[in-house]
Image (tube, grey):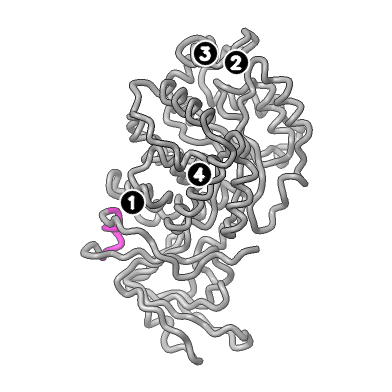
Amino acid sequence: MSNTPKIQDDSVVAPVAVRAAWLADGSGACFAPGVLVLRGGAVVAAGSPESIGVPGEAVTWVDASDSAVMPALVNAHTHLDLTLVPRIPEPEHFFQWLGGVRSARLSMSADDVRQSVIAGVQRLDAGGVAAVGDIAGTHALQASLVACADLGLDGCVFEEVFGMGPRVPACLAAMEAMTPAAAGGHARGIRRGVQPHAPYSSDRRVFEAALRAGVPVSTHLAESVDERRFLADGSGPFRDLLQSFGLWDGTFSAGARHPIDWMAERFRAASTGSAARRPRVLCAHLNDIDDQALALLATLPIDVAYCPRASEFFGHAGHRYRAMRAAGVNVCLGTDSALNLDTPDRITTLDDLRLLMRRDQLPLSDALEMATVAGARALGLDSARWDFSLGPVAGVIAVQLGEHRAPADFGKTSTAPRWICRPAKP
């Protein structure tokens, strides 16, 4: 942020000035009270009222003096196609819940999926989200690409694949057909990527082919201790689940100490010989991490999408996101699916940000970074658009504070955000 802003006189777009109870961004800056001056979707001034002063030309003032004002948010991991699926009763075991999700998806028509994705995008909008990492299940890829583009969202739609057992040859052929051009460039807008679902549901060869394809890659990783057991010796409930799905043919190669070790081997096998060209992988959850895995994680091209409310839903405690951040890992926030959330009207990392502040006493600066610039980095976006430095901004939202007006008390708020400046369509 600049404390000595200058409004550009050569623009034909009239500026808008926003008064805020406090103003904060993903770079760690915070002004209470604050003023943000925008012109045509770009920040031209941001700071305290004293530093802004009186603009030297006519401006339109927006009063958000009862609200916190911040950049629009990033939801780095969600499943929009599950938005309208009836809530699945909380299971005794995670693999049982996965079976319920699979059954629900099999019962959905293509139009059911499309309507569910549209509802999900609408709930992203209701939550002040400007960029998304969506995991598109069966029939959902094109529906999600269209719905996200129609709203002007940045980010990536990852096509989910279950490449295990008899499905391996078809998945490998599909990976061979993928090209960076088909994924879309790094300009603004929604891109296409691929997600081998998880190490217990996609063969190592499928992962390695995805890493070589040159498109954005995501996966679920280290989600539960059962995953560690399966990768070690091929036993446990995930083997039973694969057998029930008809995806077990005995060709799975076990022997990994931990899912992070398994991923490290996939990077080595898929290596092009240039560390600079190694693809990054956006890995969701990472609930099961020991010290040895954490040390290895910090050396790998992995971004972590932590979904706090989803972790709580499945009974995981003590997530090591702070240790990961201290080790230099880029940790951002996601929501997982609407099936795990306590906010039926919105799908937004705003509520996960507030949970971390309330539960863990995480400072606002750290929580807001995870919900904005860290997510932008993980999705390959320009993270500068998620702070209030001078220039284009991804969007601006305001959140009414009520009695909890101090920035440190933001975790105690619960209201939905409202848009001050929506993202412009590319």
Identify the disc placed on residue 244: 3
Going from the N terminus, do you reach mark 4 or mark 2 first? 4
Going from the N terminus, do you reach mark 1 or mark 3 first? 3
* Nearest the eye: 225 or 257: 225
Identify the disc placed on residue 116: 4
Secondary element at tag 1: helix
Distance Cα–Cα, label 1 vs label 3 = 39 Å
The magenta region covers 405-411
Secondary element at tag 4: helix
Check if residue 39 falls in the magenta segment. no
Distance Cα–Cα, label 3 vs label 2 = 8 Å
Q: In the image, which is nearer the foreground, mark 4 or mark 1?
A: 4
Identify the disc placed on residue 354: 1
Q: Which residue is mark 2?
A: 247
Q: In the image, which is nearer the foreground, mark 4 or mark 3?
A: 4
Q: The disc labelled 1 sits on which kind of residue?
A: Arg
